[in-house]
Image: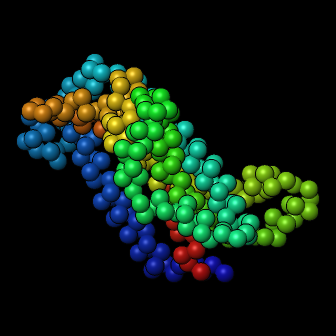
Amino acid sequence: MSARLSPGRAIAAHAALLTYTAIALFPVFVIVINSFKSRRAIFADPLALPLPGNFDLVGYQTVMTRGDFFLYFQNSMIVTVASLFCVLLFGAMAAFALSEYRFRGNMLLGLYLALGIMIPIRLGTVAILEMMVASGLVNTLTALVLVYTAQGLPLAIFILAEFMRSVSDDLKNAGRIDGLSEYAIFFTLVLPLVRPAMATVAVFTMIPIWNDLWFPLILAPAEEVKTITLGSQVFIGQFVTDWNAVLAALSLAIVPVLVMYLIFSRQLIRGITAGAVK
C-alpha cells in the first residue's frame, strides 16, 4: 500500500526538484538570452540579459535566410514523431508478449532484446551504412526512422515490460471472459494503465533522436533531408563560426523538447517515481 510523504520530506523533495530543474535549465537560459544579443555582447558578458543596448536579431535573420531552416525543422519532426510511434507501438507489443505469455526461452529473449541498452548502436555504423546503401535508403528519412527505432526499442521493452507485469491479471482475465481479443486487451486495458511509463519512454527516446548529429551526417547528409541539428552545422566553419546564428538555431530547436516535456511532465514524474514509495 502506498504511503504519503511527510510534510518535511515533501518540502525537501519539491526543493530538490526545483534545484535540479534550475540547474538543468540554466544552459538553456544562457543559450536563449545570448541568441538575442549582438556578437560583441555575447563575448563581453554572456550572462547579461538582452537589453536595448545589446539586443540584436541578426542570428534569427541569418537562420531564416541561409539554408532552409523550416525544411530542416520539418525533417526532424517527421523523423522524431515516426520513430517515437514505432518505438512505443512495437516496444509495448513486445513488452506485453514478454510479460504476459510464459514460454521456453522467455528470459533469454528478454535479455537478447535488452542487449541494445549495453551495446551502443554506433558501433555498427559501417554495417548499417552498408545495409542502407544496399537497400537504396541512403539520403532518405526512412533510414533515420529505422535506425532510431532500433536504437529506442531495447530501453522501451525493458521499461514497459516491468510496468506491464504489475497490471492485474484479474483485470485481463475478466476481459478475456467478456470476449475481448488479445489485441483489445492490449489496447484498451493494458496501455491506458501504463501511460506514465509510455510518457517516460517517449521523453527519454525523443531527446537523443532530436539532438543526434551522427546518423543524419552518415545516412542522410543531402540538403533535402537534413535534420535541424545537421542543418545548424552550416553556421559552424573551420575558421569562423557565426555564433549568433548557431545560438538562434539552437534556441529554436529547443522549443519542441520543452513543449513535449511540459505536456508529459506529470506522466513522466509518475513513471519515474512509480513504485519508489511503498
* Residue at (37, 41) in percent of width and height: 215
Q: Is residue 204 above or below residue 60?
A: below
**Frontmost residue, 216 versus 218:** 218
Q: Is residue 218 left or right of residue 166?
A: left
| Quadrant of res 163 | bottom right
The answer to whether any part of residue 263 appears in the image is no
**Frontmost residue, 203 versus 160:** 160
Which residue sits furthest top? Answer: 65
Q: Position of residue 61 (x, y in %)?
A: 26, 22
Q: Position of residue 152 (x, y in %)?
A: 50, 52
Looking at the rendering, in which quadrant would you find the N terminus? bottom right
* Residue at (26, 51) in percent of width and height: 27
Q: Position of residue 158 (x, y in %)?
A: 56, 63
Q: Is residue 235 left or right of residue 172?
A: left
Q: Is residue 171 left or right of residue 8?
A: right
Q: Is residue 91 above or below residue 248?
A: below
The answer to whether any part of residue 118 appears in the image is yes
Q: Position of residue 103 (x, y in %)?
A: 73, 69
**Frontmost residue, 88 versus 147:** 147
* Residue at (58, 44) in percent of width and height: 86
